[in-house]
Image: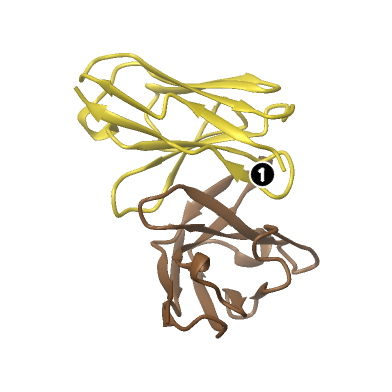
Amino acid sequence: QVQLVESGGGAVQPGRSLRLSCAASGFTFSSYGMHWVRQVPGKGLAWVAVIWHDGSNEYYADSVKGRFTISRDNSKNTLYLQMNSLRAEDTAVYYCVKGGEVNKMDSWGQGTLVTVSS
Amino acid sequence: DIQMTQSPSSVSASVGDRVTITCRASQGISSWLAWYQQKPGKAPKLLIYAASSLQSGVPSRFSGSGSGTDFTLTISSLQPEDFATYYCQQANSFPYTFGQGTQLEIK
């Protein structure tokens, strides 16, 4: 079955960088677009970014554009989120999400918590 | 960006009740709408995609309808495990956006 395991979260000071990883298994990773979605603890869901199955296209939420970069290594079945110039408002649980046909986001990882604080 | 508005924000219901949650998009999104269920401390789970298609493994008591700007999620007969928070999400265009959530509580 589909398994998505995020790692790389933790506590970081404002202005610093962090890279999240998502190890995928149980499906043909190179065939599917992948997303990052975040959730401030106790709040709602917010879509962050998407990357096409072959890495040829990316889209970002306005709140992270220019600071975050989504990427993937299909040879390693791994999705990444490079987060630079982190702000307190980036504090959230970050979920790795598998895309599917008809634009659905059908499988979610367990999430990794990023805390941005001085 | 497309704004998604859910109502109600919270609802209390009993086991066996029929519950309907609505979601309105700020502009037409055809049938590009999904519904998710989230329990405390857990990742969201896809229930419905393309407005009315049931995700594999999801019980048939869950159903979705609508197109354009107005959508509904219906749970035909609430079970104890259905008490959770529900989110709608538009998949018509990037950035994808979610509703604010509806918390379904036990009466």
Residue A54 percent across, percent down from the top left:
75, 67
**Residue at image x 21%, y 19%?**
B14
Q: Is residue B53 above or below residue A16?
A: above
Name which quarter of the figure residue B29 lies in: top right
**Residue at image x 52%, y 77%?**
A20
Q: How is the image coloured?
A: by chain
Chain A as rendered: colour:
brown
Q: Quadrant of the N terminus of chain A?
A: bottom left
Residue A9 percent across, percent down from the top left:
43, 77
The answer to whether B74 appears left or right of B70 in the picture is left
Name which quarter of the figure residue B70 lies in: top right
- Few, some or many C-alpha atoms within 10 Å of disc 1 (few <14, some 14-19, many ≥20)? some
Chain B as rendered: colour:
yellow
Q: Quadrant of the C terminus of chain A?
A: bottom left
**Extreme-right residue of the structure:** A56
* Residue type indicated by callout 1: Asn
**Extreme-front residue of the structure:** A118
The answer to whether B55 appears left or right of A100 in the picture is left
Dot 1 corresponds to which residue? A103
Residue A61 percent across, percent down from the top left:
67, 57
Question: In front: B61, or B16?
Answer: B16
**SS of the residue under disc 1:** helix
